[in-house]
Amino acid sequence: MIAVLLGSAAIGYADNLWGALKTNNHLVLIRHALAPGLGDPNYFHVEDCKTQRNLNDEGRYQSKKIGDLFRSNGIGKAAVYSSQWCRCLDTARLLDLGEVSELPSLNSFFEHFKREQSQTEQTMRWIQNAPLDTPTVLVTHQVNITALTGYYPEEGEIVFVRRSTDGQLSIIGSKQMLH
């Protein structure tokens, strides 16, 4: 009986998050799905996926399941923006929630921390000016989500965020996609 009660509470919590995403001033940040390894090779080129750490089969499956989760919660279409890294673009496209637009400020600065402040400021300005009147999804990297929110997400984790009237962000919950 306890498991049923906990399960019901978790579902109610999730329903509240999905309901919030359907209202103004909410968005989700998604850390790209499972891409084994850490960082990118020294010969990395953003326009060449063969030089990057990419999603594996499990990560591609995880991305599709994240999209299914959106649809099962009544969100079949969203405004989707992504880092230009292949693992993020692949995650975003496999969600199958609509056209994916590249947003360079979502690019990883993991190996270039000198870009953290400027990219975070650019992303915050983008979020502050975005209409957010339709479900909005930003697919990015752990370092970017942590810089924006102070939270360290798992691969494939959905972080639900509220934008306040003064433009500040606050996390209202998250959903981990187990792999």
Image (cartoon, rainbow, N blue to C red):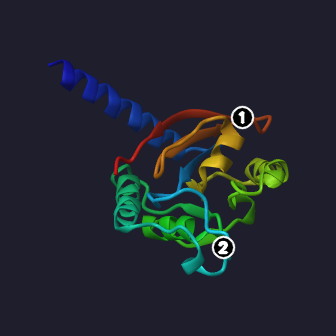
Type of residue at label 1? Ser
Single out the residue that lies furthest toward the front.
42
Taking depth in this image into account, of 38 and 66 the one nearest to the observer is: 38
Residue in the image at 64% along x and 70% along y = 101
Which residue is the site of mark 2?
44
Residue in the image at 60% along x and 36% along y = 151
- Residue 78: percent from the left, percent from the top? 53, 61
- Residue 57: percent from the left, percent from the top? 35, 68
Q: Callout 2: 10 Å neighbours few (<14), some, many (20+)?
A: some
Say whether residue 40 is left or right of residue 155.
Answer: right
Mark 1, secondary structure of its residue: loop
Single out the residue that lies furthest toward the left.
1
The image quarter containing residue 104 is bottom right
- Residue 82: percent from the left, percent from the top? 62, 64
- Residue 144: percent from the left, percent from the top? 67, 49
Vertical order, 121 against 107 (above or below): above
User: Of the residues under marks 2 and 1, which one precedes in the sequence?
Assistant: 2
Vertical order, 82 against 113 (above or below): below
Q: Are marks 2 and 1 in contact (CB under 8 Å)?
A: no
Type of residue at label 2? Phe
Q: Which quadrant holds the N terminus?
A: top left
Disc assigned to residue 164: 1
Q: Callout 1: 10 Å neighbours few (<14), some, many (20+)?
A: few
Mark 2, secondary structure of its residue: loop
Disc assigned to residue 98: none
Q: Nearer the viewer, mark 2 or mark 1?
A: 2
Say whether residue 160 is left or right of residue 119.
Answer: left
How far apart are the alpha carbons under marks 2 and 1?
37 Å
